[in-house]
Image (cartoon, grey):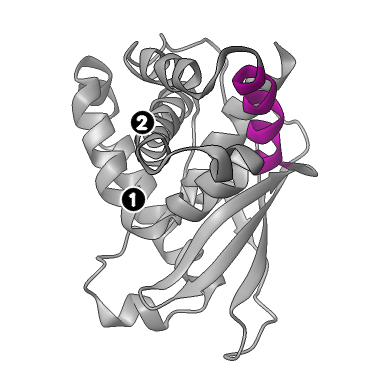
Amino acid sequence: MRIKSVLLATITALFLCLPVLAADNPASMALPPDQVILQTASQMLAAVNSRREELKKHPQELYDLIGKILLPHFDLGYASRLVLGPYWRAATPEQRQVFQDAFYKYLVHSYANGLLQGNYSDSNIKVDPWRGSDDDTRTMVRSKVSRSNGAPPIQVDYAMVRTQDGWKAFDVTIEGISYVMNYRNQFGPEIQQKGMDELIKRLNEEAGKGPAPQMQGAG
């Protein structure tokens, strides 16, 4: 399905630049959003690239690494509400939590695939200077991710919100395609046809498959 292939690229680009600075580091909370992305992209990529072969053999270590890096700096709760839309309001509190957990594992699985199949470095990423102010509570950080095959760079725009723990991402738009809207359009009909519990079951099954084999020429 075309949406699925677009989503893999979306997830990969989404989390390449999410903050990896320690959550208890006050300096990271004071950073403007573009500097958060610039400084942390190289740390994240270095952490994976230095252990790529090892992580291919031990996917759980890759998942743990992504989880440690990602979770404190991504507004998963808000993103989950946006993705489910009206189905979030109709869901029970237990379903909301179980969906959020399954969605998180599904994102980590998708990102792991993207990391293993891609060939990324911090030189692939160019972030536009942030033009916002200290009073902003939401912003968009714009960037381009170059590709090793010579194709035009991918436009990646990060929707971010200021929290008490610093700036967090909740949506990313890849070449005009929002990952939140992509998942909403994918999950909505599935919930309508099969129900929330079946969607949660599928997400957990997908997340349990492990990273896909690396494809030749990826990245």
Q: Which residue is mark 2?
A: 105
3 on left or right of 82:
right
Q: Position of residue 2 (x, y in %)?
A: 73, 16
Quarter of the image that includes the C terminus: top right
Callout 1 amino acid: Leu
* Position in image of residue 8 (x %, y %): 57, 26
Which quadrant is home to the N terminus? top right
First in sequence, mark 2 or 1: give its number: 1
Locate residue 39: give its quadrant: bottom left
Residue 127 horizontal/vertical position (percent):
62, 62
**56 up-or-down from 24: above or below:** above
Q: Could you tell me how far apart the alpha carbons at marks 2 and 1 are, in whole angstroms? A: 11 Å
- By secondary structure, the bulk of the magenta-drawn segment is best described as helix
> How dense is the environment of label 1, judged by Cα within 10 Å: few (below 14), some, or many (20 and up)?
some
- Above or below — where is 36 with respect to 80? below
Q: Tell me if 196 is positioned left or right of 45 in this view.
A: right
User: Is 28 above or below relative to 47?
Assistant: below
Q: Which residues are magenta?
A: 178-192
User: Residue 96, percent across and down?
Assistant: 42, 40
In terms of depth relative to the viewer, which is nearer, 119 or 37? 37
User: What residue is at 32 percent from the left and 14 percent from the top?
Assistant: 210
Report helix, strand or loop for mark 2.
helix
Is residue 48 visible in the rendered structure shown here?
Answer: yes
Residue 122 belongs to magenta span: no
- Give me the residue at 45% from left, 56% from top: 75
Q: Nearer the viewer, residue 197 or 187?
A: 197
Residue tagged 1: 71
Q: Are marks 2 and 1 in contact (CB under 8 Å)?
A: no
